[in-house]
Image (tube, helix red, strand yellow):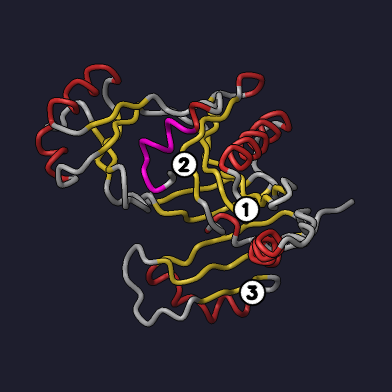
C-alpha cells in the first residue's frame, strides 16, 4: 500500500487524518482536470518509485502540462495541492505484534534540494501538535497491523493555537530522520525494530538531550577529519566508494545534554 502514493493517500484519509488535496492522474486529460480543480502551484508525482524528489514535477503558473506529464514518463501519477507549511516533521515509532507502541520525540526536518539535510529534536511545535502527530502515527500503525519501526512524514501548518499536522507519506522501515537515536535516545531505532519483530518488550524512546543529526551529502563527507575532531560529534560513514552530488554518504549526530 505504501509503495503507491494514491493508495497511501486514500488509506490515510480513511483513518480520518488530513492529507494534501489530491487527484489521480492517468492521462494528460486527467492532469488538466486535476490542475483545474487543485490550482497552481501543485505537485505532480509518480504513484510508484519516487524518493528524494525524484519522480515529481512542480506545476507552476508557467508550467506546460504536456511537458510535465512527459517528464514523469507518462506514468500513473497523483497531483497534490500545494501545502504552505511552517515546518516539516516526522514521527519515528515502533509497534509490536501485541499492539504495544512507542514513539520517539517528534523530529523537525530541514530539506535541501528535496533531500533531508538536518533533523533536530525537539521540534519547535506546541505540545498539543506533537501529541497530535504521534497519535496520527499510532492510528496509522494500528490500521496497518504494522510490526516494527516506521516513520510518518508530516507538514505543520499554521502557527500557535492554529497549528495542525498534514500527513505527507508513510515510510514502513527505519528512517533517515531517526538515525539520531543511535546516540540520542535510550533505545536506537534499529534496536527497537529488532525488539518489535522478535516480540520483545519495546525499549524506552526517551531522548538523552537536545539532538541534531546532519546528513553528509556528496562532498560533505570529505569533512570527516574535522568531524572526528569535533567534541561530542558522532560520525557515521556508510562505506560508499564514490561521493556524488545528492548521494547520502553518512551522517553526524550531536547530542547536548539538557540541564535538569
| Left or right of 69 on screen, residue 229 | right
Pick whichever of labels 2 and 3 is earlier in the sequence: 2
Dominant secondary structure (helix, strand or loop) of the stretch shown in magenta: helix
Which residue carries the number 1 mark? 147
| Left or right of 175 on screen, residue 112 | left
Residue 147 versus residue 59: which sits nearer the camera? 147
Name the element at disc 2.
strand
From the top left corner, tell me how far across and down residue 172 is, in percent. Answer: 52, 52
What is the spatial separation of the Cα atoms under label 2 and label 1, in whole angstroms?
18 Å
Please state the extent of the stretch shown in magenta in the rendering.
3-11
Which mark identifies residue 169? 2
Which mark identifies residue 230? 3
Residue found at x 71% / y 28%: 128
From the top left corner, tell me how far across and down residue 240 is, in percent. Answer: 41, 79
Residue 136 versus residue 214: which sits nearer the camera? 136
Q: Are marks 3 and 1 in contact (CB under 8 Å)?
A: no
From the top left corner, tell me how far across and down residue 17 is, in percent. Answer: 55, 27
Residue found at x 70% / y 47%: 103
Q: Residues within 10 Å of mark 1 (few under 14, many from 20)?
A: many
Q: Is residue 73 visible?
A: yes
Amino acid at each position: 500500500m505504501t509503495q503507491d502514493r494514491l493508495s497511501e493517500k486514500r488509506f490515510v484519509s480513511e483513518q480520518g487524518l488530513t492529507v494534501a488535496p489530491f487527484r489521480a492522474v492517468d492521462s494528460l486529460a486527467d492532469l488538466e482536470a486535476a490542475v483545474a480543480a487543485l490550482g497552481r502551484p501543485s505537485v505532480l508525482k509518480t504513484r510508484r518509485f519516487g524518493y528524494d524528489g525524484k519522480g515529481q514535477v512542480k506545476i507552476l503558473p508557467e508550467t506546460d502540462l504536456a511537458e510535465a506529464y512527459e517528464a514523469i514518463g507518462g506514468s500513473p501519477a497523483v497531483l497534490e495541492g500545494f501545502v504552505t507549511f511552517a515546518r516539516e516533521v516526522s514521527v519515528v515509532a515502533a509497534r509490536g505484534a501485541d499492539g504495544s507502541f512507542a514513539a520517539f520525540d517528534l523530529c523537525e526536518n530541514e530539506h535541501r534540494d528535496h533531500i533531508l539535510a538536518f533533523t533536530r529534536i525537539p521540534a519547535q511545535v506546541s505540545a498539543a501538535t506533537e501529541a497530535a502527530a504521534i497519535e496520527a502515527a499510532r492510528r496509522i500503525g494500528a490500521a496497518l497491523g504494522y510490526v516494527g519501526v516506521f516513520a510518518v512524514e508530516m507538514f505543520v501548518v499554521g502557527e500557535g493555537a492554529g497549528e495542525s499536522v498534514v500527513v505527507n507519506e508513510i515510510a514502513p522501515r527505519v528512517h533517515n530522520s531517526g538515525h539520531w537515536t543511535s546516540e540520542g535516545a535510550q533505545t536506537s531505532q534499529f534496536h527497537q525494530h529488532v525488539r518489535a519483530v522478535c516480540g520483545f518488550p519495546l525499549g524506552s524512546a526517551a531522548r538523552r538531550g537536545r539532538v541534531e543529526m546532519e546528513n553528509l551529502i556528496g562532498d560533505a563527507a570529505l569533512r570527516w577529519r574535522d568531524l572526528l575532531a569535533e567534541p561530542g560529534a558522532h560520525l557515521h560513514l556508510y562505506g560508499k566508494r564514490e561521493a556524488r552530488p545528492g548521494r547520502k554518504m553518512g551522517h553526524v549526530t550531536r547530542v547536548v545534554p539538557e540541564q535538569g
